[in-house]
Image (cartoon, rainbow, N blue to C red):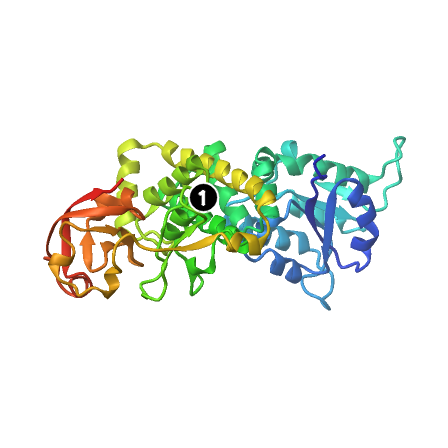
């Protein structure tokens, strides 16, 4: 049975004990109530987008204080709500707000006249004003009951919460598999653009393609935590994305140019972590988003290519198709991880395998060593495909990475500078060896 969904509510009130006294009642309505005693403290917890998006509602006292030690201000609500609406615009997200007050003061009408001028969707969010000490009615409820009841009703209507409910299995898997905290916001932003396009008028396909690439990185980091992906593939905090994809798909891969590191593979030949369908999806996502092996950033060349494609089609459906396929990958991984969670046993599956040819790193780089010979096609940290000192065309051969290839025709590398120094030869014709 699914756990209850709790909504996070920020209470801003200078009565230090109010939050604690209301929390038992809040829990009955599945609300997690957290209190700030002044607006300055509240702004701190709302100051960045990730923190801001965590909140499902905010409750303000009608006469609170701007900072601790300062007197209550008649203009508090106007100041706080002006700041708050500015944050909503800045982070492009609305959080329902309500006022909970003792009322009864002579100046209360003045306070209320001020906040009536601040726009609010009464129909969607319910009434705005509630009183702390209003007597219980014939239903045995006071105003605080109705406030909490209203928040419990309104919170699921937020776009963010609609996505979390619709894809609850996905987010449960991400939590159980210890995905990085930023990953939830990434998936919510992509899926929100899919389901609520009217709220994403400034849709930027390049930004969203990069977010999919980030999600693949978080998937690999989760695999590393339980030993399904060895530490070989994470150097200096960076994940070798292409190498990780090949290893989990059961392909042989050399994670370093250091000749003391041999080629490795998951398990025996034919074994893999990824099912073939999962391996294909991950490979395609990495291929369509960027040609780099180590970075999650999309460079200018990739950005121009993706933008040109989007301008041609004026359609986001390729992107959304990959987003939904990634949901499938993550849910599949969560099920696989449940029965393969022994880190030591997983790491023991990492096998050192001999290359089918003499180590090309130990060979003298002469053209005769390459032409007509078979080698493992690899990718360096800048995205270049190569067999030892022989450069290979990326566009024509990206689908052969991690496989043995025959270099049919080899010539001098006509590039200049560092690329020629690193790879003095270029293979103009390449065939994959079955």
Query: Residue 172, how many percent across, how many down?
Result: 61, 42
Q: Is residue 163 above or below residue 102?
A: above
Q: Secondary structure at mark 1?
A: loop
- Local crowd size for mark 1, using a 10 Å CA cut-off: few (<14), some (14–19), many (≥20): some
Number of dots carrying numbers: 1
Q: Is residue 99 above or below residue 321?
A: below
Give the residue displayed 77% in from the left and 42% down from the top: 130
Q: Is residue 319 left or right of residue 3?
A: left
Q: Is residue 432 left or right of residue 173?
A: left
Q: Is residue 30 left or right of residue 415?
A: right
Query: Residue 328, how many percent across, how many down?
Result: 49, 36
Q: Which residue is mark 1?
A: 272
Give the residue displayed 27% in from the left and 51% down from the top: 376
Can see residue 36?
yes
Furthest residue to the bottom? Answer: 69
Image quarter (top left, top right, bottom left or bottom right) of the C terminus = top left
Q: Is residue 151 left or right of residue 375?
A: right
Give the residue displayed 45% in from the left and 51% down from the top: 217
Image quarter (top left, top right, bottom left or bottom right) of the N terminus = top right
Query: Residue 309, how many percent across, how many down?
Result: 28, 37
Report the front residue among 368 and 4.
Answer: 368
Query: Residue 150, how many percent across, how many down?
Result: 72, 36
Report the front residue among 376 and 395.
Answer: 376
Res. 362 image quadrant: bottom left
Give the residue displayed 30% in from the left and 46% down from the top: 403
Can see residue 75?
no
């Amino acid at each position: 049975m699914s756990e209850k969904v709790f909504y996070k509510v920020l209470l801003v009130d200078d009565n230090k004990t109010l939050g604690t006294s209301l929390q038992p009642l809040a829990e009955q309505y599945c609300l997690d109530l957290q209190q700030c005693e002044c607006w300055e403290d509240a702004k701190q917890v709302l100051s960045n987008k990730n923190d801001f998006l965590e909140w499902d509602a905010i409750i303000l006292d009608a006469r609170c204080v701007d900072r601790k030690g300062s007197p209550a201000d008649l203009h508090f609500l106007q100041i706080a709500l002006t700041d708050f609406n500015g944050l909503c615009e800045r982070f492009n997200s609305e959080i329902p707000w309500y006022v909970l007050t003792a009322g009864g003061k002579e100046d209360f009408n003045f306070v209320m006249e001020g906040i009536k001028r601040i726009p609010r969707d009464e129909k969607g969010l319910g009434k705005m004003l509630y009183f702390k000490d209003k007597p219980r009615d014939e239903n045995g409820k006071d105003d605080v009951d109705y406030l909490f009841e209203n928040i419990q009703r309104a919170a699921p209507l937020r776009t963010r919460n609609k996505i979390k409910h619709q894809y609850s299995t996905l987010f449960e898997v991400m939590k159980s598999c210890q995905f990085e905290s930023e990953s939830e916001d990434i998936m919510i932003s992509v899926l929100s653009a899919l389901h609520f396009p009217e709220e994403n008028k400034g849709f930027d396909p390049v930004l969203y393609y990069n977010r999919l690439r980030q999600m693949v990185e978080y998937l690999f980091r989760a695999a590393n935590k339980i030993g399904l992906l060895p530490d070989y593939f994470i150097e200096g905090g960076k994940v070798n994305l292409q190498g990780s994809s090949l290893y989990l798909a059961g392909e042989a891969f050399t994670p370093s140019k250091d000749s003391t590191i041999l080629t490795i593979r998951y398990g025996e030949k034919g074994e893999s972590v990824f099912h073939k369908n999962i391996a294909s999806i991950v490979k395609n996502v990495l291929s369509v988003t960027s040609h780099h092996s180590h970075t999650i950033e999309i460079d200018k060349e990739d950005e121009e290519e993706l933008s040109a494609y989007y301008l041609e089609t004026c359609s986001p459906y390729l992107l959304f198709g990959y987003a939904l396929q990634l949901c499938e990958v993550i849910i599949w991984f969560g099920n696989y991880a449940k029965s393969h969670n022994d880190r030591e046993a997983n790491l023991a599956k990492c096998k050192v395998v001999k290359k089918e040819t003499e180590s090309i790193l130990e060979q003298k780089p002469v053209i005769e060593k390459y032409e007509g010979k078979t080698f493992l096609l690899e990718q360096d940290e800048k995205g270049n495909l190569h067999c030892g000192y022989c450069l290979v065309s990326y566009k024509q051969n990206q689908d052969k990475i991690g496989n043995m290839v025959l270099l049919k025709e080899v010539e001098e590398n006509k590039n200049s500078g560092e690329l020629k120094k690193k790879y003095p030869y270029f293979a103009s014709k390449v065939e994959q060896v079955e």
